[in-house]
Image (spheres, grey):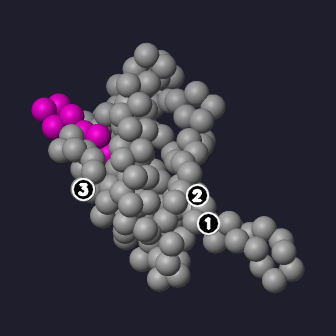
Amino acid sequence: MFEFVTKREYQPYKVEVDNFIKIIHKILRKEKIVNFRDDLIGSAGRRLITRVENGNIGFDFDYNLEITKFYDDKFQNPKTLKNIFRNIFDKTFDDSYEWAEDSTSVFTIKKVDKKHSRIIFSVDFAIVHYYEDMKGEDKKK
């Protein structure tokens, strides 16, 4: 069985994540790596957050991190860029978060309640870059 998570419960965590993302924006701009915009997507973007009732894996947020500017071509390699983001996220988020987990298309951070051995919530980040092909059509990379 699933239950809805109230705005009162998830909002402080969303604000916390958004504040970390703002810090990461500043770091990546200052270091002349990339500019990006962040979009909350999925169920959280529609304010329909659910979780397993009486579960221990919490709820989740999903963000697209859309690259809007590369300062140097060497950062356009998807694997390199993903590793840069993961490393900066690991340095920025505090001890209440686990290290970023890597998967094929996203990386995930989890806020944990170590005392009760449960995940409060997790956040999946997908790095997205739109480009134009030779015909001028927009494509995702």
Residue tagged by mark 1?
129
> As drawn, is 117 to the left or to the right of 38?
left
Q: What amino acid is labelled 1 in the image? A: His
SS at mark 1 in the image:
loop
Q: Can residue 102 be seen by looking at this rendering?
A: no
| Residue 66 numbered mark, or none | 2
Quadrant in the picture for the C terminus:
bottom right
- Relative to 109, is 138 above or below? below
Residue at coordinates 43% horizontally, 16% vertically from top-left? 8
Residue 121 pos. (x, y %): 36, 37
Cβ–Cβ under 8 Å for marks 1 and 3: no
The spot of residue 131 in percent (x, y) is 70, 71
Q: Amino acid at mark 3?
A: Lys
Q: CA distance from mark 2 to mark 3?
A: 21 Å
Q: Earlier in the sequence, mark 2 or mark 3?
A: 2
Residue closest to the eye, 22 or 13: 22
- Which mark is first along the chain, 3 or 1? 3
Q: Earlier in the sequence, mark 1 or mark 2?
A: 2
Residues at badges 1 and 2 in contact (C-beta under 8 Å)? yes
Residue that label 3 marks: 91
For the residues labelled 1 and 3, the Cα–Cα distance comes to 23 Å
Identified at 47% across, 83% down, the residue is 74
Q: Quadrant of residue 130?
A: bottom right
Q: Is residue 33 visible?
A: yes
Asked which quadrant contains residue 20, the reply is: top left
Magenta residues?
110-117
